[in-house]
Image: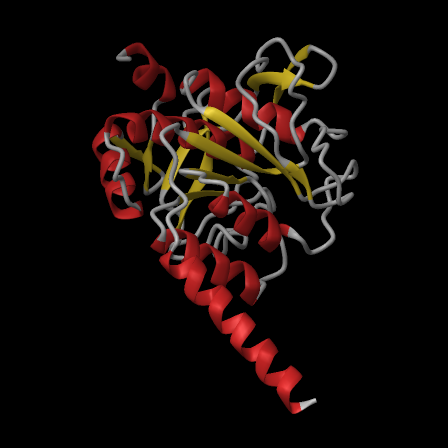
Amino acid sequence: MKQFFLFCVFLITGFFIYIELAEFDTKETIVAVVDTGIDASHPMLEGRVENGYDFYNWDLDPMDDHGHGTHVASIIHSVAPHAVLLPVKTLGENGKGVGTSFLGIFYSVVKGADIVNLSISEVENPLTSWVIRFGERKGVVFVGASGNDGLTNRISFPARLDEVIAIGGYNTYSDHLYENGNRSPDLDFLAPGVLIEGASPGGEVVRKTGTSFAAGSVSGMLAYFKEIQPKMTTDDARLLLRLTSFYEKDGYRVLELDRFLATQ
């Protein structure tokens, strides 16, 4: 029994040493979408979605049976059309998960993701915190949605982690912060999040509202920056976004997606 225990200790220690020393970066710019999956057959996304994994049903088919992930993915693609989308399904058809998001994030990192979009909200989990810190050490940039609970002093987890760039929603129609978007001093930027057009499973195109879609546009912007600056870190990403935002609204820097796209 003692020998078996020591073997397990050496095995686990060796695993952690390996992942800390390993390099997972690839030549392509990869954006992982940790969400409800992606409908890779949608005309807006066809040819830009690589094989991913379903951590909700534990299979190789991360098909979107909800619609949220496909919508987010199409927004990312509209901003960074040359980026590869990695579907990582951790949420089911009801939009809820089973506690496997930390595995999905770890999978994203070892698959070579440059940007990981986290338009999700969950109970604070030390495993999720650890794997995000691990990913940042590997040069991965994380973008999180602040959540849609209307909170004025707290944003969702994992967006509120220091290693995650937290994005709130901006209402371009009222020229104010999206009223149901969570906010706090942890919020980094605002981006358009009201009635945002995107893909829906089955080939449809719909408009949806929420901080998830604001985060998707920022992940797309960072994927574009990553192609220009391959060694971009989280600090670099925050600086580039700050240089791209030209004014403040309700105390937060606003990222104007239309102006950004017009200059590309």
Numbered circles on residues, count: 0
Looking at the image, the residue that sits furthest to the bottom is: 2
- Give how far across and how far down residue 217 sits, in percent: 44, 27
- 148 or 262, which is in the foreground? 262
Q: Can residue 177 be seen in this view?
A: no
Q: Is residue 137 visible?
A: yes
Q: Please state the horizontal and vertical placement of residue 216, each as a whole percent of the image.
A: 49, 30
For residue 183, side relative to residue 247 (left or right): right
Q: Where is residue 168 in the image (x, y as percent from the top left)?
A: 46, 39
Quarter of the image where one finds residue 185: bottom left
Check the image and report above or below for 112 versus 135: above
Image spot of residue 15 (x, y percent):
50, 65
Seen at 59% across and 13% down, the residue is 46
Q: In which quarter of the image is residue 74?
A: top right
Q: Name the one closer to the observer, 44 or 4.
A: 4
Height in image: 154 above or below 11? above
